[in-house]
Amino acid sequence: MRAGARSLSVRPAPRRLPVETPGVNPLQHLFDRNRAWALRVAEKDPEFFPRLAREQRPKYLWIGCADSRVPANQIVDLPPGRLFVHRNIGNLVVHTDLNCLSVIQFGVEILQVEHVIVCGHYGCSGVRSALEDRAHGLADNWLRHLKDVMRFNRRELEGLPSARRFDRLCELNVMEQVTNVANTSIMRNAWKRGAEITVHGWIYDIGNGLVKDLGVSLDHPLQPEY
């Protein structure tokens, strides 16, 4: 290189993004099903989507399990716009879970729902995993809340046969989450303002498609426990 000549920096060639092969979309069938569904709905009710786009005024907040076999709207046969839904593994309401708490606050204070439904289900994989004496990785930190429910109800659960213990823990978990919802500052403040909101505990049976009310509904604050 001659004296005084500038060195030229070589820029790397731009990285090319992978290009999908035309006509080979592994999810195309889902787009096709979406289009077919939208056409069916619009043919039956031309104002359905315009009406849905204008606002949502659900009366119900559904807190359920993320299990793919437990679709909230279908279980209670309600169309889009009628349920405000939050789902996670084990239908848990944890007092440090800002995701769930934000959903509850939005439902109660903004949408002004009249009912909060905690719906668990028999055969819950989260509950089954909590019953197992083995590690599940990162999920164990979440499952700890289910293990706490086991600890709270150890005497009752220890005397039950394995299958019944599994089912009963699914029920007890729902009951505990109803209490957790009722104890949030969101619900306590809403009731203090005079809001008429009821928290319900339901359980769904995947084997027959039916929902059962566990009879633990609350429409008032619980007495503080110290």
Image (cartoon, grey):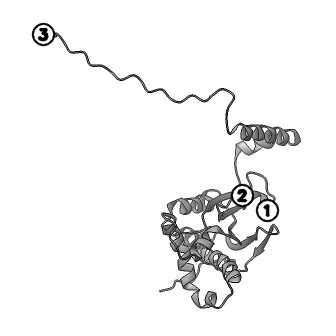
Secondary structure of the residue carrying tag 3 is: loop
| Residue for badge 2 | 83
Q: CA distance from mark 2 to mark 3?
A: 74 Å
**From the viewer's perspective, is 6 left or right of 196?**
left
Q: Quick check: marks 2 and 1 in contact, CB under 8 Å?
A: yes
Give, as a three-letter code, the residue at label 3. Answer: Gly
Give, as a three-letter code, the residue at label 2. Answer: Leu
- Whether 147 is drawn above or below 4: the answer is below
Residue 180: name its quadrant.
Answer: bottom right
For the N terminus, which image quadrant?
top left
- In the picture as drawn, the residue positioned furthest to the top comes out as 2
- In the picture as drawn, the residue positioned furthest to the right comes out as 44
Callout 1 crowding tier (Cα within 10 Å): few <14, some 14–19, many ≥20? few
Q: Earlier in the sequence, mark 1 or mark 3?
A: 3
Q: Position of residue 204 (x, y in %)?
A: 75, 70
| Residue for badge 3 | 4
Residue 201 circle label:
none
Q: Earlier in the sequence, mark 2 or mark 3?
A: 3
Question: Residue at 64% across / 68% down in the picture?
Answer: 125
Q: Position of residue 83 (x, y in %)?
A: 71, 58
Q: Earlier in the sequence, mark 2 or mark 1?
A: 1
Please tell me which residue lies in front, 79 or 125.
Answer: 125
Residue 155: name its quadrant.
Answer: bottom right
Secondary structure of the residue carrying tag 2 is: strand
| Residue for badge 1 | 76
